[in-house]
Image (tube, helix red, strand yellow):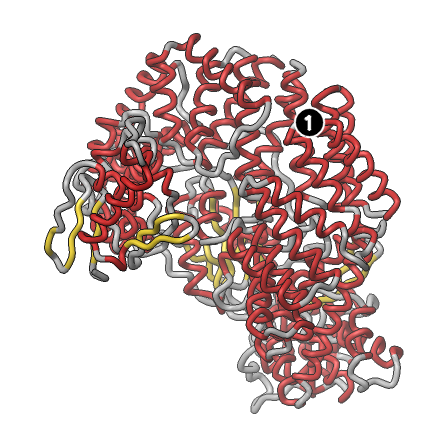
Amino acid sequence: MSDLRFSVLGRMEVASGGEQVPVPPGRRRAVLACLLVHAGRPVTADALVEAAWSDDLPRDPRASLHTVVSRLRTLLGAAALTVGPGGYTLEIEGGAIDADRFAALAERAQGAPPQRAADLLREALGLWRGPAYAEFADRDFAAPEAERLERLRLEVTEDRSAALLDAGASEEAVRLVEALLVDHPFRERAVQLLLTGLYRAGRQADALDRYRRHRTILAEELGLDPSPALRDLEARILGHDLLPAHGGAVPTVPAWLDTSTAFFGRDATLDDLVTAVADSRTVTVTGVGGVGKSRLVAQGLPRLVERLGLPVMVVELASVPPGRAATAVADAFGLRPRAGNVTRDLLEYLSIDRALVVLDNCEHLLEEVAEVVDAVIRRCARVRVLATSRHRLGVTSERVVPLAPFPVPATGDTTSGPGTDPAVQLFVDRVRRLRPGFELTAGNAESVATVCRRLDGLPLALEMAASRAATLGVGDVLDGLDGSAADEPLPDLRAVVEWSVRLLSASERRLLGQLSVFVGSFVTDDVTSLTGRLSLWPGDGGVVAALGELVESHLLVREERGVAVRFRMLALVRAYADGLLTASGEADAVRCAHAEWAGERVARAARDWNSGRAVAAGESLVRAGPDLAAAVRWTLAVGRLDVAAPLVGCVRQCPHWLPGIELGDLIVEVAERCAEAGDPSLAVGTAAGALACTDRGELERARELAAAAYALSDDAGTGFLAGFANVVSEFYAGDYDAASDWLHRVAELPGLAPGLRAEPPITVALLECYHGDLATARACADAALLGAEAAGSEPARAFALYAVGEVEAKEDPRQGEVRFREAAAEAERIGSEHVHHVARLGLFAVLVRQGRHREALDLVMPLLHDLRRAAMWPQLWTTLRIAAELLAACERPRDAAFLLGAVQAADDAPQLVGDDIARYRHLTDQLTTLLGAAAAGRITELAVGVPRAQVADWAVSVVEQTRSARNG
């Protein structure tokens, strides 16, 4: 019966070939329902006996179960129900259960155009005929799955309403959520959708009235205020969708482009830009390459920050490959999303954030950038987007600020001096920066004006020509410009780049092509390291001189960061230089040299990270990140896994340093390719991917890759990475014994570097602490700290300090506090994000339980922000649990009950262990007694319906109110 179909979204039904298969009431239905809950996975005989008979067991349960299963096989077919060492398994095809089809349709709707999403979600909701597992929803074996499906049904209903709103069907969206709110009046998102729908339907007064009614119900029945998101929505409805005025400190302007040089001829356009961004949530500055789009935006950022009060995030897209736009934005925000849809996680993060997102150089990613921007504008109400592109994005409500080249002096114009033209002013200023004595005179004014005309007033072209004029003179520059007529402008900026390149020597042109492989900025040592691998240069002196000429020719940008001097190549120049490299026939050799350079860079960083130079190593890894990703992409494209495997292995041998999303994805791809190759020399690449999968929450995939790595090799590097992948997988699965076994196996690896050998005892100490064996935990933690210090590993020392803090907090909270503070400070200094977060979490718990509420309130707000950015939701839920303790102690019992209800409903919240079980049971009972069972239940119902990002936002708002009240 391979065509079996099962329906559980309502009373359970079975069909085959379109015909109903009657399953008689009683034990067969109960056993089948239990098997469906675990479809495709083995179910133990004991679990099936419990489902069939509950407490009324037959004399011989196993024999009776065998009879029930045999009868089920008769109904379903022998192949449908198999038995193995783990128990009985219902073998079904994908999509055979309506609940799976429902979830698949909901997943397909994610990211689909609004009307298509609405149609898919309507189809999904149409599968429901009643409550999930209706006749078994109160039984222990089915209740959790029934509750999960019901929560998903409510979320999908809200998703469909949101899609309808985006598709312009406001009235239908309103009807949908109004029906949902009848039975679930406290669902936060449904209320938001209702207010938005009423407003968009032209019913502003009704929207405001419903808000006031909801606020009244919350206050009278639950004693709560509306969430920050709802209050913000009311303000935007009152202001006809304008953001409320900002308050508080003005955010700092991020360091991006150098704006120290004089800025000419754009004052009116700059005013237009600031006004446009203030009035519109999507603004695109358009214009040809080299016209100054990025400089205009950089020049306007201080004014925009002052006017809007929004933090600014700049995302440079010039070197981002196709298909990675959303990843680049998430990486810029420092997000660490779990496995799955990066866009979804980005939208969740931005949904409660306030930001001005600058997307620079969008033209080569136009379609995917437009999709991301459209989703952000629709779903993230407090975010604005400012883009630069040669073409507009084409999204709804986009406002375009076109930027044209400078006007140039007309030929023979004697009515005004050429020195008043912005093109001439820019040219003269840039020449003076290199040749301070240069002046615009009657003798050279017409030649300068002619250069400006020939370059069509294009700012970047003028700057490149000015750098040449400072050396050669204006006359020689003019003579060198091509064109069929003296005043005919060059056709585009590429022609200007080509002209500038022609003035280079052959070796300088070769170097320009070779430097196009660098994606990020680089220093002189990087250049000499690259060229030294090519055997094409007689010595470093010639390379350095050629590098200086490229800077003088404005083909490289020189950036001074303190005492360091770095170089970067503009996207337009890189495109031309890449063509030079391809034409030279050296592309493969140069890209291979670049990949080897990247491998050497990361190997040195890994050594430094684990041997007392972690700060420099971390900075090096961050700066090299784009080039590391580019190198790995090339190795994958040409099949050079022998280069890729050690490179990604070294990245992952920096414990507690997390790569960005792009590099993390590439590490997993390398791992899978290495596993397929089956070459023992590539095992470290497979092991690196196993550990990367644990960061993404893909525990089963991590186990599979770890097993593949162990099957290939047992060398120290491979064993460390694969072993720790298994440690983390078993730890998160709750199997502490298995995790401990793997730790001991890693600790016994021969040839393990001292910095890495310091890691296993730290985790052993934490496991023993969670087990409640404090004596063993203390001994392990103290030994781990000594081992880390002896190895000179700063990351291991920070982690060991955290472990010591966890142990000491159990017996001496004050001493635990000292250790947590040490761990957090050390982790922050070296850039170990994970340890920095968990150490502050431990400190937060100590402060709350010592009654030091003011300090706890100060600590928790940045901690919540950082955990959400890092997508560390298990730790964030733990923080919210502790925050509930804090709020209860600060006489905010309703807010405490709300947070506890949200945590209780969260699928990814950690299970309570040890003393916490009794602690939170007591807190729940205390709140229920104080509020009354009915009110506490309604607050929990409200919490269950609030998206997790808004739960975190709610917590931040309540903490801020509590801080203000206590400080006031």
Q: Nearer the viewer, residue 347 or 453?
A: 347
Quadrant housing residue 603: bottom right
Task: Find disc 1 in the rendering and name its residue.
Answer: 843
Say if residue 952 shows up in the picture: yes
Tell whether 92 sits left or right of 696: left
Quadrant housing residue 752: bottom right
Up the image or down, 393 lies above or below 305; here it is below
Tell whether 156 sits left or right of 638: left
- Residue at (56% x, 28% y) in the render: 913
Up the image or down, 56 lies above or below 319; here it is above
x, y (%) of residue 256?
A: 65, 54
Say if residue 266 shows up in the picture: no
Q: Nearer the viewer, residue 41 or 887?
A: 41
| Tag 1 secondary structure | helix
Question: Is the N terminus in the top left, top right, bottom left or bottom right quadrant?
Answer: bottom left
- Residue at (80% x, 41% y) in the render: 797
Up the image or down, 757 lies above or below 196; here it is below
Type of the residue with mark 1: Leu
x, y (%) of residue 787?
A: 84, 43
| Residue farthest toward the left in the current orientation of the protein | 19
x, y (%) of residue 136?
A: 25, 34
x, y (%) of residue 923?
A: 50, 15
Tell whether 249 sits left or right of 329: right
Q: Nearer the viewer, residue 897 or 146?
A: 146
| Residue farthest toward the front in the current orientation of the protein | 59
Tell whether 673 sits left or right of 935: right
The 10 Å Cα crowd at callout 1, few under 14, some 14 to 19, many 20 or more, is many
Question: Is the C terminus in the top left, top right, bottom left or bottom right quadrant?
Answer: top right
